[in-house]
Image: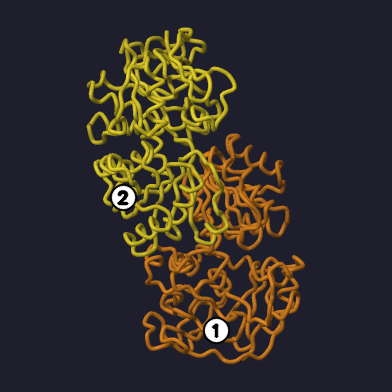
Chain colours: A yellow, B orange
Amino acid sequence: MFGAVIHAPGDVRYEERPDPTIVEPTDAVVRTVAACVCGSDLWRYRGISPVPRPTPIGHEFCGVVEAVGDAVTTVTVGDFVVGGFNPSDGTCPVCRKGAHANCLNGAHYDGAQAERIRIPWADGTLVATPEHPAEDQVPSILALSDVMCTGWHAAVSAGVGPGRSVAVVGDGAVGLCAVLASAQLGADAVIAMSRHEPRQRVAREFGATHVIAERGEDGAARVRELTEGIGADCVLECVGTEDARLQAVACVRDGGNIGLVGVPHGELPMNDLFWRNVGVKGGPAHCRAYLPHLLDLVLARTINPGLVFDLELPLAEVAEAYAAMDERRAIKSLLRPRSA
Amino acid sequence: MFGAVIHAPGDVRYEERPDPTIVEPTDAVVRTVAACVCGSDLWRYRGISPVPRPTPIGHEFCGVVEAVGDAVTTVTVGDFVVGGFNPSDGTCPVCRKGAHANCLNGAHYDGAQAERIRIPWADGTLVATPEHPAEDQVPSILALSDVMCTGWHAAVSAGVGPGRSVAVVGDGAVGLCAVLASAQLGADAVIAMSRHEPRQRVAREFGATHVIAERGEDGAARVRELTEGIGADCVLECVGTEDARLQAVACVRDGGNIGLVGVPHGELPMNDLFWRNVGVKGGPAHCRAYLPHLLDLVLARTINPGLVFDLELPLAEVAEAYAAMDERRAIKSLLRPRSA
């Protein structure tokens, strides 16, 4: 089969790789229907994270089960499935608490930007649709494998719900999904911070009640104007840079919460947040905990997170998918194998 | 009148001070029935925080209203009242969110270890009992002015509730109250970390299901033994030292929460907590938000936080009250003016 391999910063190639097989009895093999490029893949593409050797890349997918190990009971050959970016066994004490991202036996994919993918812990990772979905629902199902679960996680971590005002820092795919999650979770006001018109449009479609183009102290002042002068109850930090984290600190009200899902770069002023009674929670999303509910919402056409994909390419053109995101020509690139 | 004044580290004197008066129409003046010494008062007593000039000291009290300003409507002369350590106006947007500790118009007491106290924002700060309480309930009511609200705040901040396991770091008055709060909030397991037999006894009386004498990695290992090997859902950090904070980090499970109420000394490993999906929240307690419920529980004799007082002295002996706590001869000292 063929799949994406990162060789060095800026160098992602579509090349032949061994066909994945069932290694453990808890494995499945999935034939990819759609995959995509993650903002976090760009850390290596941009040379910020190291690429010590050529490595298969990608962790977002949906597809059709082609094989299952003897111990797999909840999905079967022919099922259309989606899985989160972080395989979980679903049975360890941490998974039983709903914290699947921190599964005691957590695993990784060996490159999901590929025609086929080996799925560790198939029962604890995959969720099957009742029937094969309509073609136009594939992007939204694919979005559940990372960005929608991650935006949802930001909102859940910050305690978003009815009666709450929310400000979302970051207008990438995760930030936009955090807007959608906040609206879906019943927030009263959802303030998207974005200065890019196409992203502002998606944010509004996703349920943003306000869109703010300002940043820094001006942005925080605009958030305060919309929140009785005190800042938002919940701020969702969906970038990870030091600027974004400090933007979140500036936008949250005393006694409020910051939900963090951006991979952290930079510190937080924790002593200041203590005196302000601001809570901080977040990390990698507990995808498998959220997938059943979010998949129901997608299949019922209640949410359409697939709108975050604004570029679709054949999987063979994965290099261009990276370049387009790196150069900010695309919010997020969807990839389809020829066979799909 | 007479009251306590700190002159320098180790030097707290009982001396004559001006009688407090109504300054603002929102003020009340309270005749003290009981006051006490806080662990946080010891920061100055021990020379860790500066004492730039002789300063009236103390922020915990209960007593009887002697005078009210023209704008005060919810308490009246003769009422028995308790107030939190941090006066709040009760009407600003932050107070309306329940975050009274961060009131936009927050104020301080001018020394509550005194025969009389001026109370700013009487309506937003004080809660009156339906009738004057039984003498034996005074210590528990007094405990609501800080340590019980603070222990409750630690538990609320960490999301303690039914189905949760809790570990409490710190066996001072606040830590013991955090045990009581956790039991009252319905936690399944409440693990008190204490190696002092008298404090262990209070912890058990307050509802601790387990008491652990070990500290450091041994203590964390004992917590894991009691929690399916993964650590507690909620850890309440009631000390503030770097050791205590790292103890909390070591005892919490991935995906769990740390409630912080110890005045922070030292950093938290926030990047590690991000990857572990551990939440951190806390700060000064929102006393006025908690007081009505906690006062009901005390008056119904459901909780008895007054057990944390193991030394009672006349207010005139306030210097000894400090010395006893500083030398760890007492968990917490209760003071009564002669007149009370």
Percent from the top left, x then y, of residue B104?
Answer: 43, 70
Question: At 38% from the left edge and 37% from the top edge, which residue is drawn?
Answer: A174
Query: Picture quarter containing residue A270?
Result: bottom right
Residue A105 image-quadrant placement: top right
Same chain for mark 2 and mark 1? The answer is no
Image disc number at residue A190: 2
Instruction: Name the residue carrying label 1.
Output: B117
Quadrant where the N terminus of chain A is found in the figure: top left
Observer able to see residue B188: no
Splitting the image into 4 quarters, where does residue A313 fall?
A: top left
User: Picture coordinates of residue B52 (x, y %)?
Assistant: 68, 78
The answer to which of A315 and B139 lies nearer the viewer is A315
B185, above or below B88, in the image: above
Instruction: Provide the secondary structure element on which disc 1 rests.
Output: strand
Image: B4 above or below B18: above
Q: Amino acid at mark 2?
A: Val
Secondary element at image label 2? strand
Foreground residue among A68 and B320? A68
